[in-house]
Amino acid sequence: MNNPYIYIKGPCNLKGTVEVSGAKNAALPCMATAILTKSNVCLKNIPEVEDIKIMKKALEDFGALISLDKGTLSLSLKEIIKPVIPTELSSKWRASILTLGPLLARNGYAKVSMPGGCPIGDRKINFHLEGLRLMGADININMNSIEAQCQRLKGIDYTFPDVSVTGTENLIMAAVLAEGKTILRNCALEPEIADLIEMLKAMGANIRGKDSRNLEIEGVKELQGCNYRIISDRIEAGTYLLLGAMPDNELEIKGVNINHLSSLISVLKECGVSLDIDKDSIKVCGKVGLNSINVTTAPFPSFPTDLQAQITAFMLFLKGVSRVEEKIFNNRFQHIKEMKKLGADLELKENFALVKGVVKELKGNCLKASDLRASAALVMTALKAKGETRIYNAYQLLRGYENMPGKLRALGADILLKEE
Ligand code: EPZ
């Protein structure tokens, strides 16, 4: 679809059950991990979203044979023909950087254009490059591409200067075939990393310290293939949970890993949302008059930056003034100006926003999505606005939410994905 936009006619009161899809941010590193073996890899619960399609294309360009059907991805990369990701592919998405470590580990050479992805702030990759250089990679950056080569990578003892999700993932994938032992300190703890470690162990990798900030990896000569099921998407689940907590909505979210949402659950309980939590599902119903809240984003297990825009949308319907502070990215409030076009009352300061709840009725308008999670927040807000809303640049939503318009229509929303 060229120039897709989301059409919404609100207000919509949503009722029903929604099934969470597989986690995009687990599927991406797990697909990149398949580079590390000549054997067949089968991944289940893969969400059919644009970022996954780009990773699939990149792997095919490397020489992989891949099929993706109803969430099951079968992949074999017997021989790497062309370890290169061109700009037109790499510039669209952040996860291109995740192929650098595995390509060096398997093949000793990689040429990856500088990664793109959400324009939510500095998307530095200095930790990735610093770690790989210490492992023996010779890395040159010219214009817009990273060219790297090495003999066999060597184990290192490396401390991340700051917590980085894909930085941790990249160095884990580089280390599993490196010579000797690697110790990674100050690693990220996001559940997607534990998922990657579980998959690598299933392939024969020797990794100790899962779910801790310090990992010990003993390099092995080669890895086997595996059958592995990806975890469910905690950010998609959190998005629907916040939607269900908005006034006049009543949802059951199924296929949830409750432990991955503890920070959001405690915030929702704090403001008085009634939740009925079962083994892998949560029932939530929204009401007006809930207390305002203060939220600050930080690395897992704290409140995730990937739910910051969505909780801002939820805060619009609370009593009084709520506060949301973004401490991970330096440009992740682009949804604020768009929400104001619907009549929302928000005040943006340097790295936090004040959200004045329940001010007056929101009215539909034309909006533009800036990034993946902002697009979801604009959908959430527009569903409660009176009249018609169009959200342009809807490609951003399609990058990371599997069939969101379809899932919302099943809950009673008047929403369509259209093209200009
Ligand atoms: C991952 O991005 C996720 N993307 C992001 O999700 C998520 O917002 C982010 O982690 C934080 O949780 C994927 O997993 C594909 P970081 P990543 O490296 O790895 C600085 C979404 O919506 N940093 O943890 O790129 C960096 O500038 C996306 O699904 C360095 O300084 O994030 C940032 O301020 C958006 N040097 C902070 O660390 C580095 O080498 C966190 O970045 C790397 C990072």
Image: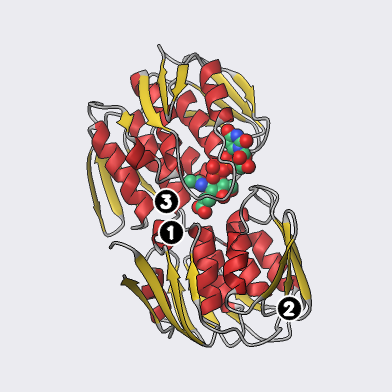
Q: Quadrant of residue 88?
A: top left
Q: How far across and how far down the image is residue 146, in percent?
A: 43, 26
Q: Circle 1 is placed at which residue position?
A: 396
Whether residue 102 is visible to the viewer of this picture, yes or no, is yes
Which disc, if any, is residue 230?
3
Badge 1 amino acid = Gln
- The label nearer to you, 3 versus 2, is 2
Task: Give me the C-alpha separation between circle 3 and circle 2.
Answer: 32 Å
Element assignment for label 2? loop
Label whose residue precedes the other's in the sequence (3 or 2): 3
Image vertical order of residue 104 relative to residue 20, above or below: above
Q: In the image, residue 257 lies at what x, y percent?
A: 54, 60
What residue lies at 57% left-to-right and 18% top-to-bottom?
A: 156
Element marked by disc 3: loop
| Circle 2: residue type | Gly
Q: How is the image coloured?
A: secondary structure
- Nearer the observer, 46 or 406: 406
385, above or below 201, in the image: below
Going from the N terminus, do you reach mark 3 or mark 1 first?
3
Frontmost of labels 3 and 1 is 1
Q: Is residue 282 visible?
A: no
